[in-house]
Structure formats: structure tokens, C-alpha cells
Image: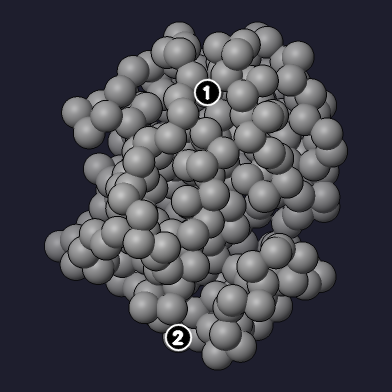
Amino acid sequence: MRNRRAGRTTGPHLRPRAAVLTAVLLLLAGPAACSGPGARPPADGSAPGAGSRSPSAATGGEDGAGHWRPKPGTPWQWQLSGRVDTSVDVPVYDIDGFENDAETVDRLHADGRKVICYLNAGAWEDFRPDRDDFPRTVRGRGNGWPGERWLDIRRTAVLRPLMARRMDMCRDKGFDAVEPDLTDGYLNRTGFPLTARHQLAYNRMLAELAHERGLAVGLKNDLPQIPELVGSFDFAVNEECAEFGECAALTPFIEQDKAVFHAEYALDPDDYCAESERLRLSSLRKKLSLDAWRRPCP
């Protein structure tokens, strides 16, 4: 399990290998876990709304619920560090929700882009403006990176309003979608006895919060739970499925005509682009810093 920001990788001791993932997939092939808590209004009491939206780009359309759903093979840019380079000629951008303002989103919309709001949903970060809103009791072990600790995702009564306010921010800035990160804590040593059932409930809660606000939502990694969660999410974001031989696990999204935004850090595109084209993934190579540099599949 790897993610975002400069040098971001939780390391091999936290990353389950393909054999472990296969075993978990078999275990989860049984009855789906119960869904999370029911829908609630935004924590500030305001009515959910879609906010401003860009003109429809050539990235797919809206589903029956009225939010955007990107199509397989849609090109994308993923930049979570540095000043956003808005000149990359792709229809989808994925950028940090806290570090970018509504003007940046509007500028991308003016160029016909859809814009995804990156948020950390699975770890507390001491550099975010809402850091003091997270009680110490929900902060677990460090996840290997300065200033970050895993969240106790069992505590949905505490975390739901906090995540709701973050998604309110995305909506109010005009984003089209949300990428909640670290949504596979149950596969890691968090300091809490998290189970697959806890993760399913929490991830479904995140999807509900996004959809209540008219935002699309992507499932980040969490390959073992794709069969249970593909119906709740509008696209997937994956890191390094080619390096670990896991890309076929993402086909349920493609089969439902939903994009898979995929990044590799170590492999050369020649090593994975043929498979990506066959599977209809939106693949590119990125540096671990996740700056503006990108090398997409041809």
C-alpha cells in the first residue's frame, strides 16, 4: 500500500504481497459485509449541493444520481506537490484539496477539465488546518511518515462529521470528485484491531458523503474489497498494480464502464503499457514526489 506526496511509500513491511491479496480476495468472496451508517446531512447543517461544475468534458457523463462518472481509458494528471501546472493537456486532474483554491479549480474548469479533490481519509496529519479537530483517541500508530498517524476508522461517529467537513470544502471549491486516500488501513499495523468489515463500512460511508454533495468518488487501492465496493464508487485510483502483478483485480471497475486511474513509480512504461491498454487502464508513470512530471502510456 503506497500513496501520495514526496517519498510517500509505507514500505514493504506494510505492503501485502500478491499472495496475501489473493488469499484475502478468496476470504471476501462470501457474503458482503453490512454497509456503513445511513446518509446524514452535512455536519454544518447545510443542505448537500453539487456546487459549481465544469462543462462536460470528454471523460464520460453523469450517472443516474447526477454526479460525474469517468470512462475507462480517460487520460489524467496527478499532481500533489508544487504549484499545479495547468498546461497539461488531459481532461482530468487530481490535486490536493487543501493546498489548492477555488481559483485553481475554476482555471482548470475553464479549460474543460474535470478536477478530483485529494484528501487523506485514513490518517491524521499534523500539518492540516483541521488537525486539532481529531481527538487523540482516534490517532493510532505512525504510518511511517512525519506527522501522520493512522485513524481508528471504527469511530465513525467521530470521523463522519470531520470527513463531511472536508468534503464540504471540496464541494465549495467546485471540485467534481474526491479521492480519499489510505482506505485500506485494515491491511496495515495501525494500532487498532481493524477488520475488513470495519473497512467496508468506513469506505461506504466515504462514498455516501461524497455522493450526498454531488461529488464522484474514487476507491484508492484496497484491491481485496473491489468486488464489494465497486458498486459504491465511480472510479478507482491505483498505485503500482503492474509492479505487484495485481492489475487484473481492477477489472470490475472497467466492466462497469468506470475509469481506473493508475500510476507506476519504478517500472518503465514499456513494462506495463501493453497490459494497461489491454485492460483499458488510464496509466502513467510518476515520480514519488507526485510533482507535475508525468510519462503516460502512448
Seen at 39% across and 65% down, the residue is 43
Q: Nearer the viewer, residue 118 or 240?
A: 118
Query: Would you say residue 103 is visible in this rendering?
Result: yes
User: How crowded is the residue under tag 1: few (<14 C-alpha within 10 Å), some, or many (20+)?
Assistant: many
Q: What is the three-letter code of the residue carrying label 1?
A: Lys
Q: What is the three-letter code of the residue carrying label 2?
A: Pro
Q: Which residue is mark 2?
A: 193
Looking at the image, tell me whether mark 1 or mark 2 is earlier in sequence order.
1
Query: Would you say residue 271 is visible in this rendering?
Result: no
Element on which disc 1 rests: strand
Q: Which mark is residue 275?
A: none
Quadrant hosting residue 259:
top left
Quadrant hosting residue 22:
bottom left
In the current view of this chain or complex, which residue is farthest to the bottom?
A: 137
Instruction: State how far apart marks 1 and 2 are (Cα).
Output: 38 Å
Horizontal arrangement in the rendering, residue 181 relative to residue 38 (left or right):
right
Element on which disc 2 rests: loop
